[in-house]
Structures are given as structure tokens and as C-alpha cells.
Amino acid sequence: MIGAGSISFSLDLLMDLWLEKGLKKSSLRLMDIDAARLETLEKLIRRYREECDIDLDITFTQDRAEALRDAQYVICAVKVGGYGPLEAERAIAERRGYYRGIGDRVSCYYGGIGAFHQLDFFLSLARDMEKCCPAARLIQTANPVFEGTTLIQRMTSVPTVGVCHGHFGYRELCRAIGVAEDEVEVTIAGVNHCVWLTRFVKRSSGEDLYPRLDDWIARKAEAFWASPEFQDPEVAWRWEQLSPAAVEMYRYYGSFPIGDALRSAAPWWFHTSLATKQRWYGKAGGFDSEIGWSQYLAEKARKLERITALAEDARVRVSDEMPVHASGEQHIGIIDSLENGTPRLMELNVRNDGLIDGISADAAVEVPAMVDRSGIRGVRVGAMPDKVMRHVIEPRVNRMEQVLRAFREGDRHGLLLTLMDDPRSVSLDAARGLIEELLAQPWNEKARQHYR
């Protein structure tokens, strides 16, 4: 795992690995450049192993080449530079009239101007894999998954699959209409952070469940939106899947948006101000508003503080405070299916190759995929709903292509042209000034030299 300093995520994957019976003799190398985070993780895992008799060969390193050498699978969970530069860039953009910063409407999505830092890292990692572990598969979980998975597949020989958990948002729809998740069959498709519920049926009977959803919207949605549960500003962003924004998008496009699509694929006019966001997403204004995002960052800081304190307090059993449990993530399941043949239908980002009509063959799409010992095979979806395709997916794919072309060619004009597509760009000079100010920041020195 590259980016193991994401301690909570690393522990989740360790638990999943330990709970997967067919992988109990695996070796796990945890790599991060942050020595303090790595030391904290090592203390926690050492105690986990003693308390739970975890029989895994686990090593810790700051050396990427050492971590990669002869690996069979590599999980990338890296956020280059953390959140500090991102928040500074957001503040710069806001001073110039770009509410909540430039780029995708999911906070932290692009990882710096033009996604440069993340894309540069992904490419570097993949090229190291070609040298150190040429047979390994990359499980790409760091954002931007869409751009990143597509870039790696196009520019390297590394077999890559992108993983995200946003598709699990459909479970909220199941709860709303009173149907158990395991009674439902769904098809969720699109591109990462822009996926749609194209099939929603009851497994036993084949009943189309969209009419039940329509009934919930007609009879119960307004009361739910007015409820203290939905309007509590401390938790309201957690109910986005059932928000007015989600229902309005369903009315526009004829298919229900799932997970991060509620924000990143939402029309720009849902995001012009905090008051507008609050209208569509509740009093918190959604996950990526100044309220919701601040809560998220604060919770991450509190969690890190608690985990660090736990690592230093040898009197407390780690497994009591953080019991071993299945995380619900797909990463270890992918490995088990490929290694041991356990068939699983999963939601993954794979090379399109005709899975969704109208998208180039070598772009990554997010679709159901069957995973077993023979490999990963995306399920053909065919045509997406027409309005979803024309108004949402095609523009999103085009933006991905713009970002990747500017990155590959080091084209500063490409960054400018992409920014000019933003409705908040009032003039060419204003957009150019913002790009130059962002590239002038010390953490963007490499990006400034790259984009000529």
C-alpha cells in the first residue's frame, strides 16, 4: 500500500486482509514518506497482531522501490501534499470570485491546479511498478480516479483498476422505500463521481423499484426534507442521496444520480453560494460547502488525534477501541477473487472497450464488473439515458480529456481554456491572472515548470 499514512484506511485494509481466509498467508508492505504517521501505524499494528494473533508478514518502509519490489498488487491511496495547499488555493480562487475554488465540485477532487500533483504522482508510481513489479496490478483508489485510471492505462503497461465507494449510495434509496439491500439488483454506471442508477429491480420478482421511489418522492420527500434529521447542520450532508438536489437531478435527467454524482455532476447553478447549496442540500449545504467540508476536515483531525493517542497508550487494548471488522471496501475482495477464484460482482473503474456506448474505448468507465481467477470483466451497459449522456457524461468526459491533454503536453493555455469553460470566469484576463497566481505558489513550483 502506497500512502499508508492514511492510518484509518490502512487499518481497514489490514482487517479486511486478515478476515479474508484465502489471503491469511499474505505479506503486506506499508509505505509512506511521513515517518511519524508510519511509526504511529506500526505501533497500532504491532499491538493488533499481539491481541488478535494476526498471522501476516507486515513491513513498514519509506522507500517506494522497496515496497514495490516483486509485489503482486499495489494499492495507491496517496493525497500529495495533504489538504493545506488545497485550502490555500481555494482561498486564492475565492478572492477572485470562484466560490469554493476551481475544478470539480467535490472538494479535494483534483489535487491542485490541473490535477497536476496527483497525475504526476500516479504516472511516476506506475513507471516504478514497470521496473520493480512488472506483473503487478494497480488498485487505484486515490482521486481523481477517472483521470488517474485513464492516464495510467493509456501511458503505461500497468494493469489498473479504479476503486471508489460512492456507488453504495443506492442503499439510502433502498432504506427510503423499505426494501432490503440484498433483495435488490442494481446497475450503476457512468464515470467515477458521475454514476447513475440505470436499473433498480427487486431480485425475486424483477419488479421495477423506480415507481416505489417515485411514490416516496411524491408522498414523503417533503416531510423528510423538513425533518430535524435532515436539517441538522451537523449531519445534514450525510443525507445527500435523498436531498432535493438528488430528486431535482432525477427530474431533469430521468435517472437517479448516485453518490458523488450528487455534487460533482450537479448543475453549476446548485453551487453558486452557500444559501443556494443549503436550498438543495440542507442546512449544512452539502459535503463540499464551507460548513460540510470544515466538519469533514475537523473530524479527520479529531480521528487522527484519537488514533495517535491510542498508539501511545499501551495500557489500552487497540482491538477494544477499534474492533476488527470488515470495512465494506472492495480492495481486498478484488485480490481474493483474482487469487482464489471467488466470483464477485463489483462496481469498478475499468477500460471501457465498448461497455458504455459513446465513450472512447481507452477511457475508464465505472460499471459492474465480474472478478474471478480469470480476471476483471466489465459488464456491458450499452446506451446510457440520453439526457444523462448529452448533458452530463459527455461534458465530464470532455473535461477529463482536456485535463489529460494539458498535463501530457504541459500546456498552460490548455489550463486557461478549461478554466474559461467555468461560468464564473468573467474575462480571459481574470482567468489568466488566477492561473498565474496559483502557479506562483511555492508548492506549485514543479507544476509551474511543467505547464509552459
Image (cartoon, rainbow, N blue to C red):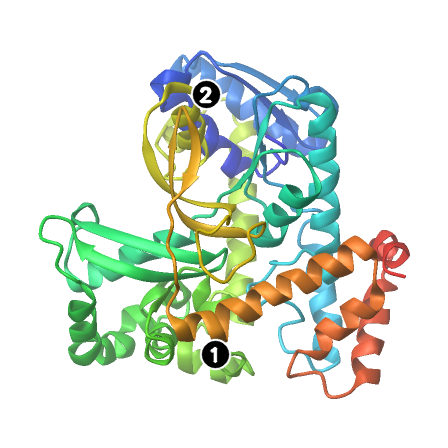
| Front residue (pair 406, 34) | 406
Q: Mark 2 points at which residue?
A: 48
Asked if 392 appears above or below 410 in the picture, the reply is below
- Front residue (pair 51, 258): 258
The mark that comes first in sequence, 1 or 2, is: 2
Q: Badge 1 is on which residue?
A: 277
Q: Is residue 445 left or right of residue 113?
A: right
Q: Which residue is drawn at 56% across and 66% down?
A: 396
Give me the residue at 68% from left, 32% from top: 32
Q: Please state if 359 lies on the left or on the right of 38 as rendered.
A: left
Q: Is residue 84 left or right of residue 250?
A: right
Q: Describe the element under mark 2 as helix, strand or loop.
A: helix
- Can residue 400 be seen from the camera position used here? yes
Seen in the picture, residue 177 relative to 75 is either above or below; the reply is: below
Secondary structure under badge 1?
helix
Q: In this view, does 272 lie above or below 196?
A: below
